[in-house]
Amino acid sequence: KEFFISRTQLHCETVIEFQLFTDTQITDIHTFFDKFFITIVKLEAVNRVEEAQNSKSIAVILNVHLLMKKIQSHLNSLKDKKNSQASASAANSTQMNTAA
């Protein structure tokens, strides 16, 4: 089962975390870079989630568009078939009236 994560929520959480990180005082350079790395990884994860959600959304839109085309094509072929049957039966009744 797939879950949709709100982009706005992800952005807010990540941006707030990044802002909190930038306000901290540096006492240990190694800790600073570790926290910086973790924050960057979270930002990259947000981008990956957005890309996946965008590609899924686009795919759904394209599939719906393709489905609509197929339905229209099928309906048009049924319409053409009915029109040809109506023309054939009209021609048959004309021939029967002429023969009688």
Image (spheres, rainbow, N blue to C red):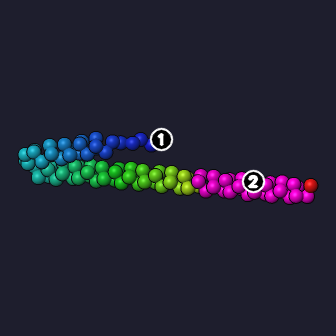
Upstream in sequence: badge 1 or badge 2: 1
Q: Position of residue 72 (x, y in %)?
A: 59, 54
Query: Which circle marks residue 86 in the picture?
Result: 2
Q: Secondary structure at mark 1?
A: loop
Q: Which residue is mark 1?
A: 1
Q: Is residue 32 left or right of residue 9?
A: left
Q: Of residues 55 and 80, which is closer to you in this image?
A: 80
Residue 45 placement, left or right of 55: left
Q: Nearer the viewer, residue 28 or 10?
A: 10
Q: Amino acid at mark 2?
A: Ala
Residue 9 visible from this viewpoint: yes
Indicate the amino acid at tag 1: Lys
- Measured as percent of width and height from the top left, residue 17 is found at 19, 43
Q: Is residue 85 visible?
A: no
Residue at left 30%, top 49%?
46
* Alpha carbon separation for disc pair 1 and 2: 50 Å
Please report the residue visible at 61 percent of the width from the left and 56 percent of the height from the top. Answer: 73
Dot 2: element: helix
Q: Which residue is at a point 45% across and 43% down the rendered structure image?
A: 2
- Image quarter of residue 4: top left
Write down the region rendered in magenta. Answer: 71-99
Using the image, tell me which numbered label, if any, was put on residue 15: none
